Image (cartoon, rainbow, N blue to C red):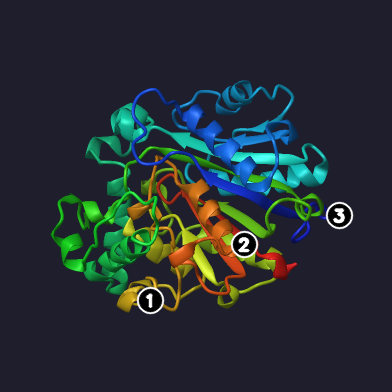
Amino acid sequence: MNRTGIVERGSTAIVGAAESELGEVGPGYSPIDLMAQGVVRALDDCGLALGDVDGLFCASTQARLAGVALAEYLRLPTAYIDSTSTGGSSFLGHLAKARHAIAAGACEVAVIAYGSTQRSLGRKNTSPTERNPYEAPFKPFLPPTAYALAAARHMHEFGTTREQLAEVAVAARQWALLNPVAWEKKPLTVEEVLDARMISHPLTIRDCCLVTDGGGAVVVTSAQRARHLKKPPVYVLGAGHATTHQSISSMPDLTTTGARQSGEIAYAQAGIAPADVDVIEVYDAFTINTILFLEDLGFCKKGEGGAFVGGGRIAPGGAVPVNTNGGGLSYCHPGMYGIFLLIEAVRQLRGECGPRQVRDAEIAVAHGNGGVLSSQATVVLGGPSTV
């Protein structure tokens, strides 16, 4: 850590990454079970053991005192714990916190973990029940209604079309068809997205993320220790976050998210520009998310995101690989998706993705979203040649 308190570029690395069981795990599993399963698999991925772990970072909407529960489950009574929750962006925020903790000597080997049984238990039994007195009288169906507002505003302000939103879902499905553990296995067309059941206008069910079970984990340590482990390190080059609001009715601008600020911070720390990025993993809970984040992270100008995703540009074989595992729209989405952004980015930079592998991938951006476009966290990751 330098004198300004900013952790030096590339001083921390992700060394292990793995999912738990995904899809519908059935009765008998708890979120902590899936977290622990992901942790053990991620440790095996890098050749470390539970006894090496002294830092735990996790968040959950289902498990009370998630960090304490995970420490008990893994029998790590003295581990450094951080259970900060900012929704789906939590785990990218945890990566930033883990690198600070490692740099400060608070821990040496940290795991970032998540697990959810949202599909098995049902949405009503796993979603937070906080009531907003300013929005509740209008009976919104949250979160889809909030994202539908953003989509409708983007369409009104910039001429974005329903077909362009649908292109995001189609591209995600094409990537998912290359991923053997993705939930969705059937091809998808723009027409099928448009003709699907309406959820909250203008979004149909195919514009909305999956509801699955699942979890996963990544293992983080110092660059020095990472060089002696089982697989090539993936270095943390930069990380930024921004929070603009909690409730969608308080969002300053429905077409501009905090990703603009979080991306600028992460790019500055990493010493890169958007043009340097080889693979992009963004939180696609809804099709409008991908368009907003591609704009706000600088991959295209504001208002041009709809045209930017057209013509298969973000699909396999396109010029800009986005959500290469199939994303929350077609791969998995167990309540909070952020951990899977990191897992896929790591695998791409290690060249482990088989038919969906992006050729010569050296720099990846993973971007998480929490709440209703509320909390944004951006991480820049680099392969061995970037440090």
Mark 2 lies on residue: 380
CA separation, marks 2 and 1? Answer: 21 Å
Counting residues from the N terminus, which is met first, the one under dot 2 or under dot 1?
1
Where in the figure is residue 96, as x and y percent of width and height?
66, 49
Where in the figure is residue 203, as x and y percent of width and height?
23, 56
Q: Residue at x 81, y 43 (%)?
A: 104
Determine whether the residue tagged by mark 1 lies in a helix, strand or loop: loop
Q: Residue furthest right?
A: 3
Q: Residue at x 37, y 70 (%)?
A: 315
Q: Residue at x 34, y 54 (%)?
A: 329
Mark 1 lies on residue: 313
Q: Which mark is residue 213?
A: none
Front residue of 56/133: it is 56
Is residue 254 in view from this perspective? no
Front residue of 206/14: it is 14
Left or right: 210 as drawn, with respect to 228: left
Determine whether the residue tagged by mark 2 lies in a helix, strand or loop: strand
Counting residues from the N terminus, which is met first, the one under dot 3 or under dot 1?
3
Choose top left, top right, bottom left or bottom right for residue 71.
top right
Q: Nearer the viewer, mark 3 or mark 1?
A: 1
CA separation, marks 3 and 1? Answer: 42 Å
Q: Nearer the viewer, mark 3 or mark 2?
A: 2
Is residue 110 in view from this perspective? yes
Mark 3 lies on residue: 3
